[in-house]
Image (cartoon, grey):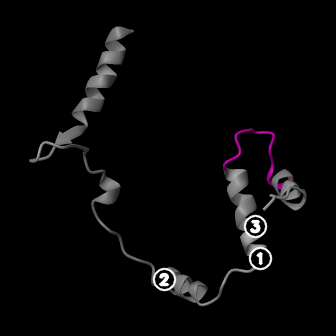
Amino acid sequence: MYRNWFARLRAMCDSLSLRDDGVTMMTARKQFLGVGDVDTSILDLFDARKQRPATEAELREQRVSYAFGNAMRDAITKDSVLAASRSVRIRD
């Protein structure tokens, strides 16, 4: 058991690198080394979306989706979060 723990610790330390100024940092990951081609149709959608403010229904859906995504229990469903969002109110 000790050897396995030590091997994992050694592997973590080997993945770190030391800069010239002595600061330890994580080594660069492949996915961040280069920027791929940008899909211009997605950029056009972003620009079009910026022209129009979000509606209350869209904001409500975003809040429900966020709450559901951060739920800690498997028993919580998106429908139950939506129902709770209609009945639970925060006091000012």
Q: Is residue 76 within the magenta segment?
A: yes
Q: Position of residue 21 (x, y in %)?
A: 11, 47
Q: Amino acid at mark 1?
A: Glu
- Residue bounds of the magenta highlight: 70-79
Task: Decide if residue 75 is on the left or right side of residue 48.
Answer: right
Q: Position of residue 14 (x, y in %)?
A: 22, 32
Position above or below: 69 against 74: below
Q: Is residue 72 within the magenta segment?
A: yes
* View extreme (front): residue: 92
Task: Decide if residue 36 is on the left or right side of residue 45.
Answer: left
Can you identify the residue that label 1 sits on? 56
Q: Main secondary structure of the magenta part?
A: loop
Can you identify the residue that label 2 sits on? 43
From mark 2 to mark 1, how far is it between C-alphas? Answer: 24 Å
Position above or below: 29 against 35: above
Position above or below: 48 against 29: below
Circle 3 residues within 10 Å: few <14, some 14–19, many ≥20:
some
**Mark 2: which secondary structure?**
helix
Q: Quadrant of the N terminus?
A: top left
From mark 3 to mark 1, how far is it between C-alphas? Answer: 9 Å
Q: Amino acid at mark 3?
A: Glu
Q: Amino acid at mark 2?
A: Leu
Residue sitting at 78 percent across and 62 percent down? 92
Find residue 33 and name its label: none
